Image: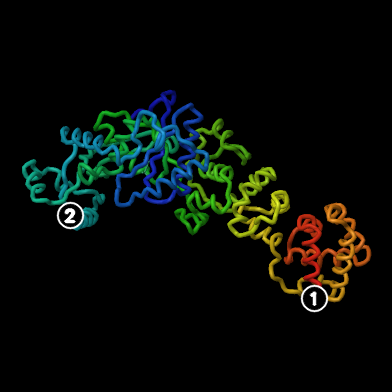
Amino acid sequence: MEAKNISHNIRVRIAPSPTGLFHVGTARTALFNYLFAKKHGGVFIVRIEDTDTARSEKKYEEDILAGLTWLGLTWDEGPHKDGGYGPYHQSERIDLYKKHLDILFEKDLAYHCFCTKEELEAQKNYMMASGFPPKYSGRCAGLPRAETDQKKKEGMSSVIRFRTPARKLAFIDAVKGKIEVDTELIGDFTIAKSFDEPLYNFAAVVDDERMRISHVIRGEDHISNTPKQILLAEAFGFQSPVYGHLPLLLGQDKSKLSKRHGAKSILEYKEEGYLPEALINFLMFLGWNPGTERELYSLSELEQCFDLSQVQRSNAVFNMQKLDWFNTHYIRQKSDAELYALCLPYLERAGLADAHMSRERVMKIIAIEKDRLKKLSDIVVLAGFFFAVPAYAKEILVWKKSDAARAKESLSASVDEFEKLSDAEFAGEKIKEALGVVAAQFGNGETYWPLRVALSGLEASPGPVEIADVLGKEESLRRIREAIAMI
Ligand code: GLU
């Protein structure tokens, strides 16, 4: 098979089956297709492969489309975006598949198979025991037309199989290079359950042709489908697209990627507070190697520099720590106002950040915690104490080199100094100066430790000046007095 020239009009697609949430594997495939289209001025298409009516659900389709949109991988053609090659749901293209099944029957390249599940199982076992590949035996391949009609009349259930020609087949995979297959090993595979129920390999070939797909870029798990699709395309006289298979995604233990490795659906990452920039950057490195040390790329930068030839052949390992690293980086790139808008929903959902806190104050809190955020939802745990002091054991108020009495004295001294400041004065530098006076008498440890705990209720937190500055005079004094009363 000859590969199509890359200078042809580039049209690529992702073809998710809406039978589950939009997961990282599909997102990675979408990203690579999107970038390939952008790089070559092509078209990125979303086709919903929903012929399996029992397993397809609208909610999954919505999840996939929402995930793509959130990642910024907007499609040029697909659901809600007609480009003249629709409809983009396979469930709406059944008549087209019927016509193509007719063509195969006319050419005697398809037949009805009546073998039951048990029979198929027994055939398979027999083939294996006799040292043959476990393919379909071909039992129904030679049924005379009259017999087929009779069985159908009797209501026997059947499927439609393709008469697979036995030959050597080779194709150039845009990622893996030359791949050779002996199609004799494949056997006559099913292409439809009935005229109204086409199956994946068959429907995909019809659609890839009708949608003028130039390149099929998809996960390596589909590589065994490719010879079948090439054979079907040949049967119709279609020119096959170029195929490129992306490396498998593995967990850190090198087993197939699953939830247990931290892999979630894309919108779950969003919920937890990962930024789309971070996920894009992370997904990109699951199989792409630009050949430099550079690690940070924005989507628009990737649109310029992505190349299929830089896709690695070896498996890609999914590393959650790396994702956190990207996320931390992109969070730090946000302005205080942007981060405020991003974090506010988390604080609100946790019942924090209510009306008594001004926007300015909440923004300040978020800015203080910015460098500690691995994901946006961390703000609730990290900044919760600004909104309400968590219950804490009075012992932690005491600095390790001191005792309760001294802690009480130094806290009282801080109260005295704070009281000397007016509400308006109570801010950064002035607070620092006031505490400097206390520290001159009690020493740093004895001053700042109990005060920080009194203000935050935590053993580890930002410094007391920063906290007091955000809380304001009244709230700071209230918290310190409460601490004194506890000791
Ligand atoms: N519906 C298939 C899937 O979700 C599409 C595979 C392909 O891209 O051809 O895996």
**Which residue is found at the position 26% from the left and 50% from the top?**
133
Q: Within the displayed image, which quadrant is ligand 1 positioned in? A: top left
Q: Secondary structure at mark 2?
A: loop
Residue 150 vs 243, above or below: the answer is below
Image coordinates of residue 97 in percent, x first then y, are 25, 37
Give the residue type at disc 2.
Thr
Image coordinates of residue 131 in percent, x first then y, are 24, 53
Give the residue at mark 1: 487
**Which residue is found at the position 59% from the left and 37% from the top?**
298
Give the residue at mark 2: 116
Q: Secondary structure at mark 1?
A: loop
Q: Nearer the viewer, residue 130 or 408?
A: 408
Give the residue type at disc 1.
Ile
**Which residue is found at the position 47% from the left and 44% from the top?**
66
Give the left or right position of residue 229, taking residue 433 as reference.
left
Q: CA distance from mark 2 to mark 1?
A: 80 Å
Residue 153 vs 349, above or below: the answer is above
Q: Quadrant of residue 8?
A: top left
Image coordinates of residue 63 in percent, x first then y, are 44, 47
Q: Residues within 10 Å of mark 2 (few under 14, many from 20)?
A: few
Q: Quadrant of residue 446?
A: bottom right
Q: Nearer the viewer, residue 485 or 243?
A: 485
